[in-house]
Amino acid sequence: TIMHLFLLLILHATAAVGQIDPAHCRYALGMEDGRIRDEDITASSQWYETTGPQYARLNREEGEGAWCPQGQLEPSDTQYLQVDLGRLTFLTVVGTQGRYARNSGNEFARAYRLNYSRDSVLWKSWKSRLGKEVIQGNKNAYESVINDLHPPVIARHVRLIPVTKPSTAVCMRVELYGCPWDDGLISYSAPEGQLLMAPGYPVASLNDSTYDGAHERRRLLGGLGQLTDGVVGLDDFLVTRQLQVWLGYDYLGWRNDSLGAPGHVEMDFLFDKQRNFTSMKVHSNNMFSRGVKIFSSVTCWFKPRLIASWEAEPVTFKTVLDDRNPSARYVTVPLRRRAARALRCRFFFADVWMMFSEISFQSGGKPLPSSSCFSLLSVGCVFARLYFLPDPSASGRPDDGNTPILIGCLVTIILLLVIIIFLILWCQYVCKVLEKVDFLSHPDVGQVWVSSGGLLISSLRSPPVASQRAVQDGVLARPSLVSIWMTQPSLSPPTACGGGYAEPDVTQCTPHQGFHGPAPHYAETDIVRLQGVTGSNMYAVPALTVDSLTRKDISAAEFPRQQLVFREKLGEGQFGEVHLCEAEGLPEFLGEGSPLPDGDGCSVLVAVKQLRPDATSQARNDFLKEIKIMSRLNDPNIIRLLCVCVTSDPLCMVTEYMENGDLNMFLSQREMESTLTHANSIPSVSLSDLLHMSVQISSGMKYLASLNFVHRDLATRNCLLDRRLTIKIADFGMSRNLYSSDYYRIQGRAVLPIRWMAWESILLGKFTTASDVWAFGVTLWEIFTLCKEQPYSLLSDEQVIENTGEFFRNQGRQIFLYAPPLCPPSLFELMMRCWSRDIPDRPTFEGLYQALRPHVGP
Ligand code: ADE
């Protein structure tokens, strides 16, 4: 594991230096020390054999001590010294000197220009960020003058062109500084950047001001520019890193509706040779308060050779949008090792604006040296080169000595050792904390064991025996990041005890096979799982043993089933159906004093939940248990059981009929009240309606919590509305078919409502009133988004589970649901408290009710 950690660290370290940092990319490229060979230094002319281009080496005195072009240089002359760097290079600094020749020379260039080329065919003139071409040179023949190139250039061939005002003899010695351009990108093309003009804000120009290619029909063609200058933009795109430039300088940005092809920006990337691409990193602004977000997805096509067509199969990557953190960030797009010479990528807008400041490509995949010692050193040295080289401009010339590197290597090794020790201690701490929670005492739904290779939590325990067997049988092994070990599907629990939480008072149960540990953590010790069989909802209730559950346990009266007249089907689940029926004579049957549903006097409409005759005996038992629980519940915000038909098959429970169906459907078909909805008579709801709904749900849950009932599946889909818009919490298991995407599937079966579940329910199988509070927070979020979106809709189920790991680790990387635009801030704060990592920090239902109630008018 330590080796793994180590390798991971090394990979991360190398990945972290994947982008070029111009502040550190300042290595002497080899004029002075001879790594650049004589034959790679040429010139437009030379005065004498002894002042040829090979003598243009900084701080050297061979020949006549410098390169001198022929004759006196006129202001209109273009003479140049040309250096072939042998490979594409990110060039950041140029150093020049005149001819000193041990005090016998006195020629130097007071100014010069720089031309560069990536292919030795197309030459470009360097310009400063403010558009100046001329660089100040030397003032005497001996001192070297260092000039930083802002912007840096990416080139293989460089020409220095001395510039003079009066006619004079000039001579030059030169060093070039930079580092290899490993991306290999030689050009990108993109739509031109645009102006951002918003009332009350200054204008920001989001163009690519250093682009060295052509501008044709509002597109940038064949060049490189700000996206490869190593300058990453700041969180606020209006604030620039450079002084004396315009607002928005660091970003290239586009407005969604302004491009020919709405919805995306298309960019082409051309490389020096065919490469195997592992990833692309796009540094993107995410100032969502100003309508800027990272792209929602990107699709890239690949071209293996220049003269070839784009390959049919693209790579698509969806990002995780972040509405909470406005920081600009690198988005890494995996490119699956696809081989290509050119890429075409379409970046899809997630908001009105998209702004990039850097794009880099990782390719090749050089194998890691096998010796980790070597790796360590190389990482150390990378760090050293990055962090310990003195800033050359400070000392007058770039420093390429080895001592700082060695110091850097040593410091880095020590740092790595400290990190490893810290990680080991941290792992030990986590294991200890988790051992306190005995997973195996929760053999029910959500039995989760996280594999040692998993990203959520490192190795905790071996999986339960049954699961180990299942793995051997290859049934449950999942190659994904997280292994979830369901001991049994939730409808067929593993032991004769009904598979629920530990039941210390149930003596006739066979011992929990492979399950042991303390009683559950919450108030009641005698709790069993109860399964909504026609659906799959579960409640934790005071214990009933399977065997002892008989007709006399059910307090609801038996209704003559022939008096139930079928009207229509309301829903369907795995083990049964819900019908709308007319119950003839129900008012008399229930007797006086019983609060009756509305009806025509002698018959009333009711919902009849009916178990399939062929249901398993387990499902049958669970159905009876559900009846027993419901017959004990009596609250205006909990669905009311009216009567049952259990003396013969099919078993039925009769509940009040809720004319407005479930809250999810109800809200998703409505808009927020506005003059528009009034005018067009669109069904609408007001903020106060939404608050009233929230209060009612909190009230029903307060009642359940007071009885220590744990619902486990609170969500808008499980809240029903009657014709007066009173909300009642129900087991709406029938909706499973309708809402199956809300449930996480294992082996194709929908089992867990993971998007509503607290981290401890997913990771530890721990369901409590506090996890119901978490689900209540998500239910509030659904209400205030008018159920237009599934929670975490941009995350796949697997990503939701990964995010759960982040909730557990609580290192600020967890993704929360965003604040719904309609939601008052104080209410969103309340939701956030429901999603507190630490259970005691979550509010109680009593507290939630008290906090919500004042928002609703009398
Ligand atoms: N679907 C399931 N139960 C229902 C109920 N009680 N009223 C309306 N529709 C339902």
Image (cartoon, grey):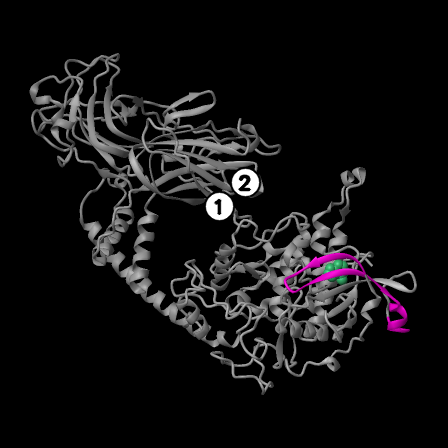
Is label 2 in contact with label 1 (beta carbons under 8 Å)?
A: yes
**Closest to the observer, 376 or 497:** 497
Residue to which mark 2 is pinned: 350
Rendered location of residue 787, percent (x, y): 67, 51
Rendered location of residue 260, percent (x, y): 53, 26
For residue 805, above or below residue 487: above
Is the residue marked by circle 2 packed among few (<14), some (14-19), or many (20+) residues within 10 Å?
A: many
Query: Looking at the image, which residue is at 27% across and 25% down?
Result: 117
Who comes first in sequence, dot 2 or dot 1?
1
In the structure shown, which secondary structural element does the residue marked by tag 1 occupy? loop
Residue found at the very far bottom of the displayed protein: 507
Query: Looking at the image, which residue is at 91% across and 65% down?
Result: 602
Q: Quarter for ligand 1?
A: bottom right
Was residue 587 drawn as part of the magenta stretch in this picture?
Answer: yes
Q: How far is the residue under mark 2 from the one under mark 1?
A: 10 Å
Q: Amino acid at mark 2?
A: Ala
Residue to which mark 1 is pinned: 319
- Asked whether mark 1 lies closer than 8 Å to ligand 1, one says no
Q: Amino acid at mark 1?
A: Thr
Q: Which residues are magenta?
A: 566-594
Is the residue marked by circle 1 packed among few (<14), some (14-19), or many (20+) residues within 10 Å?
A: some
Please state if 184 lies on the left or on the right of 542 as rendered: left
**Closest to the observer, 319 or 797:** 797
